[in-house]
Structure formats: C-alpha cells, structure tokens
Amino acid sequence: MIAELSRVLPKFETLERFDGSKWKLYDIEGGKLVLTENGQTLLAKDSSLRGALRSYRHELLNPPLSPVMRRPFRHGGNSDVFEVGETGLVVKEAGQGQSVWFALERLDYLYRICKDSLPPYIRVPEHYGAVFSSNLSRQYLLMEKVNDGTTVEDFTKDAGNTEQAAVVQGAFDKAKILLDKAIDSHAKAQGYPDRLLVDWHEGNVIVDFDSPVEEMPFTLWIIDQ
C-alpha cells in the first residue's frame, strides 16, 4: 500500500496544520493515505521515487530472496523498518495495534518544537506520509533515514563506548528536560498538545555522529514513540 504514494490521486482533502502547512488526505478503501507538505515536495522534486515506491510495494507483496527496494533495516516492538533501496528513505511497517496517524501528528508537533525552540543537536526526521486502513494487516509510515539507525540504547550498551556513552547519555537526559520545558511552553502559548513524549526511551532516539553541531559532536534524532 505504500506505493499508493506514487500514484496521482485526483481527489483529496486538504488538512491545514497548526503551523500553516497543508497535508493532503486521500480516501482509500478502509482508511486514508496522507501526504505531508514535505512529502508532497519530495515527490514533486524527485519523480524517480514513484518507481521506487512501486517496487517497494511489489517486494512487499512478493518477497524476494534478495530484496532490493524493501531491505530490512531495524526491528523493534510491534514494528519493522525497511530501507527503500538507495533513496535515503525508510518505511516503518507497524502492526494494527499501533496508530500511525497519531504518531505522525505527534512527530509533526515535535518537529516544529525542536526546530523552533531546541538546540540544533535535538531534531526530528522529516516524515513524508502514511497509509493506514482496516483492510490492511499493517500500517505504513514513510520518513527520512538517519544513518544506520543506531539508537542511544544501542550505543550505551556497547562496552567499547564507555567514555562517549556517558556523554551521549548525558545529552539524552538533558534533551528530555529541554523538551519537557519547550512542550509545556508551546502548549500554554500556542495550544499545542502537552502529551507528545508518550514513550521517552533510549531506544526511540537515534545518535548521529555524521551530523555534529557546534554544541555537540552528534545529533539526537527523536523517532516514533
């Protein structure tokens, strides 16, 4: 179903978000296809992604022995994450017990809060779209890939990272304090939801040493909670 993102669907509903961005919502059998404004821009900019998403769907329905466009990336909880070939995108495939819609909404708020009010080493990956339907066994969330997906939990459990692990853990703990303060501030001043970090955990934050900033030798990326 993620390949629905690659189709031209003439009828859609526009949903204006809190920050003025506009999402497109398409009716599909039993549910919705959602394209965020970032997703719309991405697909318009790179037409090759349409073919990549069609190939992803083909491999989803007909799993090959050596996948090319739906390559296993990370696994945890009730979901699996797959790379979309070499596109720099990943798809989170979640069980029906989870709500991709609410996850997308939460992350949209967190994306804006981090961008507006947090230091540059605390960020949320761009999220491009989602497919969910009662007729599907899983739900699908398309997002930006961040390095190899190494989380704070992965890093701090590695015995070889003792010194750096202390720095990473300290940044993770500080990030929670800063996020709580920023979320509360935005909730009071602008009416944002105040319950956005529903499962703050080391396994839900990626450590990216490929994106250092002046204040920190790495970036912490908040992923779906």
Image: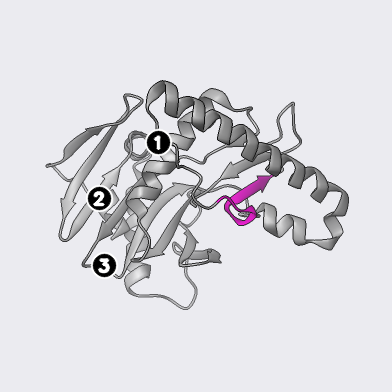
- Label 3 belongs to which residue? 136
Q: Position of residue 133 (x, y in %)?
A: 24, 61
Where does the image place residue 101, in percent across and percent down from the top left? Answer: 32, 50
- The magenta segment is 200-208
Give residue 150's position: percent from left, percent from top.
Answer: 65, 55
Position of 72 relative to 145 (above/below): below
Q: Quadrant of the N terminus?
A: bottom left
The three-letter code of the residue at mark 3 reads: Leu
Q: Earlier in the sequence, mark 1 or mark 3?
A: 3
Q: Is residue 62 visible?
A: yes
Question: In the image, what residue type sits under mark 1?
Answer: Pro
Question: What residue lies at 48% left-to-right and 36% top-to-bottom?
Answer: 110
**Horizontally, is 100 left or right of 107 in the view?**
left
The residue at 80%/50% (across/down) is 165
In this picture, residue 133 sits left or right of residue 68: left
Q: How is the image coloured?
A: one colour
Could you classify mark 3 by the number of other residues whose Cα lies within 10 Å: few (under 14), some (14-19), or many (20 or more)?
A: some
Vertical relation: 84 (above or below) 164: below
Which quadrant holds residue 121?
Answer: top right
Q: Which residue is mark 1?
A: 193
Residue, disc 2: 33
From mark 1 to mark 3, how far is it between C-alphas?
Answer: 29 Å
